[in-house]
Image (cartoon, grey):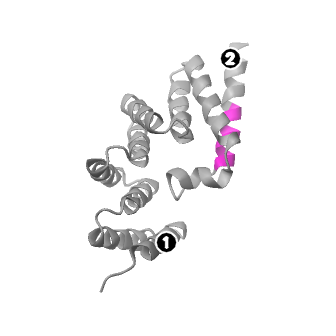
């Protein structure tokens, strides 16, 4: 019996929000098995695996997405986050730049690039990236920002506060 993949996808999002990770992943696998072209299912699966620190599996999902669609913003963003988690900052910055190339309004890519540059004490470039992320976040609707890249895990207001704080630290260092 064929399931309606869109209804099942909405159910998977709900399961993920309710921290029912195994159930959500099982449903996503069933969706992908039925419709291997449903890219959002792969992205949600990658996002969910990322949120539960299953980085190698998330990496594989991202590569599967990119083999089908080399312009998938979410996959580059997730690969950047995975590289950062694994301590490979050069690869992380490369992946975030790829995401920014695909969508200059991708505030998470600007934010995470800024975080890496801040840690490397590259104040000028960090400041520029934090300012860009902050400008994008303040300009857009807060609800759309989390949903645009992942259905889970981003609270734009928290990122606005972090950007402002890091910019004040950079201003204090400069002065």
Label the magenta part by its dominant secondary structure: helix
Residue 167 in the image: x percent, y percent?
68, 27
Residue found 42% across the figure and 45% down from its top: 73
Residue found 36% across the figure and 44% down from its top: 71
* Disc on res. 10: 1
Q: Which residue is mark 2?
A: 173
Q: Please report the bounds of the magenta region as a residue range.
A: 156-165
Q: Quadrant of residue 174?
A: top right
Residue nearest the viewer, comparing 18 with 136: 136
Residue found 47% across the figure and 35% down from its top: 100
Residue found 53% across the figure and 26% down from its top: 119
In the picture provided, is 157 more to the left or to the right than 57?
A: right
Counting residues from the start of the chain, the first of labels 2 and 1 encountered is 1
In the rendered view of the protein, which quadrant contains the N terminus? Answer: bottom left
CB under 8 Å between callouts 2 and 1? no
Q: Quadrant of residue 99?
A: top left
Residue 87 in the image: x percent, y percent?
39, 35
Residue 96 in the image: x percent, y percent?
44, 35
In the picture provided, is 98 more to the left or to the right than 104?
A: left
Helix, strand or loop for disc 1 = helix
Q: Is residue 73 above or below residue 120?
A: below
Q: Is residue 112 above or below residue 9?
A: above
Q: Is residue 20 visible?
A: no
For marks 2 and 1, give the CA distance. Answer: 46 Å
Helix, strand or loop for disc 2 = helix
Residue that protrudes farthest toward the bottom in the picture: 1
Q: Is residue 126 above or below residue 86?
A: above
Q: Is residue 158 magenta?
A: yes
Q: Quadrant of residue 81?
A: top left
Residue nearest the viewer, comparing 86 with 103: 103
């Amino acid at each position: 019996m064929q399931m309606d993949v869109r209804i099942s996808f909405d159910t998977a999002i709900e399961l993920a929000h309710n921290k029912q990770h195994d159930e959500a992943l099982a449903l996503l696998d069933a969706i992908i098995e039925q419709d291997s072209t449903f890219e959002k299912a792969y992205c949600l699966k990658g996002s969910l695996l990322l949120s539960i620190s299953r980085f190698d599996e998330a990496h594989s999902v991202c590569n599967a997405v990119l083999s089908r669609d080399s312009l998938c913003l979410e996959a580059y963003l997730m690969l950047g986050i995975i590289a950062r988690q694994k301590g490979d900052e050069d690869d992380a910055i490369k992946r975030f730049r790829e995401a920014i190339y695909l969508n200059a309004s991708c505030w998470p890519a600007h934010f995470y690039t800024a975080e890496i540059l801040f840690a490397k004490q590259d104040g000028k470039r960090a400041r520029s990236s934090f300012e860009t992320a902050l400008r994008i976040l303040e300009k857009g609707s807060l609800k759309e920002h989390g949903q645009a890249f992942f259905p889970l895990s981003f609270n734009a207001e928290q990122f606005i506060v972090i950007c402002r704080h890091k910019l004040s630290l950079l201003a204090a260092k400069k002065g």
